[in-house]
Amino acid sequence: MGTRMTMFRWPKRLVPALPLLLLAACEPDVPETPPPAPTPAQPAIAVTPLFNADSAYAFVAKQVAFGPRVPGTEPHRNCGDWMVERLKAAGATVVEQTGTVTSFNNERLPLRNIIGQFHPDRKERLLLLAHWDTRPFADKDDERTNQPIDGANDGGSGVGILLEIARHLSSKEHGPGIDILFTDVEDHGRPTGAMTHDESSLETWCLGSQYWAKNPHVPNYTARFGILLDMAGGRDARFYQEALSMQYASAVVKKVWKTATVLGYGDRFVQETKYFVGIDDHIPVNKTLRIPTIDIIEYDPATEAFGPYWHTHDDDMDVIDQATLKAVGQTVLEVVWKER
Ligand code: AHN
Ligand code: ZN
């Protein structure tokens, strides 16, 4: 026993390092000091995380399960609380904006914009947004027109995709910090004005983003660019380059559509401009804050508008397709990850 103790008496500071001990056991002339530990190499390219479409789909289904998210109702309140919880669980610093707005039909509506900030200490920002309220009526349907819709695609899909993206953001160690903005009271606009371009009707939509653009959650808020998701999860959806996005932020449109093509989603992200969105949440962001912001929104050449489910009771979970959620989600995640 005594002999063995003598043979294996190593310098004290090596004792806790078991691998070194084993190495040293095969090497009689073990150096007094271990070689310096290699400095952990920063990967040259931060690999973009995989967007999980199952998870995004479950986030859409969860919103729908709360019931229609009509401002001022209990499902709306409960869904908002859940979204805040999801953002916090993902590591965001959450800010909520509340207020009261008046709809076109003179309803006083509570407003709740929800902002999840990732790495709020970083000066450079990117803005991702989607509305989370659902339309209080089905004015494009033939029946039950005054009942609220599920809004699985119109409302649910954008939030579902962004909540899935949010799960990855705290691990983004490089580049700008991200702000996820869930706007409220987007879809309470004047029915007959839906596709017209008369100014007074346009102003009845997007009340939450109008409010936020005038009162951003951070004074003098700005971002490198913004991406709005609206009706981004429909089966076989095609995304054309929306004309107002092209007008305000063509470089961002091109960046996103090119990224989608590189990722293999060029069949969905069609490199062709279509003029159709009178207003959406990107307009106040472009006009008031001058942040170049685009809208990824379904365009259906057959209807020359959105999908046939739009503002009808058909906008339920049957419309949602994981392949579309994946194409949009992975594309946006890639665009975000590529920013240095
Ligand atoms: C108009 O209806 C004028 N623009 C589309 C905004 C919208 C409604 N997005 C979803 N629902
Ligand atoms: Zn809508």
Image (cartoon, helix red, strand yellow):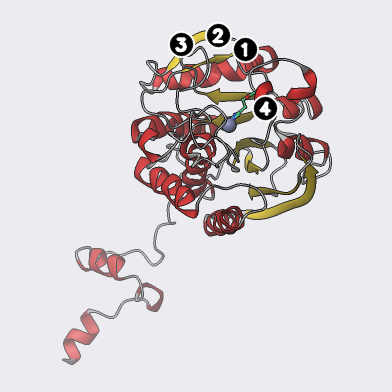
Q: Residue 124, how many percent across, how many down?
A: 69, 37
Of the image marks 1 and 4, the number of the one nearer the N terminus:
1
Q: Quadrant of the C terminus?
A: top right
Mark 2 in CB contact with mark 1 (< 8 angstroms): yes
The image shows residue 315 at horizontal and vertical percentages of 45, 34
In three-dimensional space, the C-alpha distance between marks 1 and 4, rounded to whole angstroms, equals 12 Å
Q: Which mark is residue 282?
A: 4
Query: Which x, y percent locates residue 53?
Result: 37, 40
> As shown in the figure, which amino acid type bears the numbered disc 1?
Ala
Distance CA(mark 2)–CA(mark 1)? 6 Å
In depth, the one of 122 and 309 nearer the eye is 309
What is the secondary structure assignment of the residue under circle 1? helix
Which residue position holds label 1?
243
Kindly identify which residue carries mark 3: 301
Q: What residue sits right under mark 2 in the picture?
A: 273
Q: Is residue 13 visible?
A: yes
- Can you say whether 66 is above or below 287 in the image? below
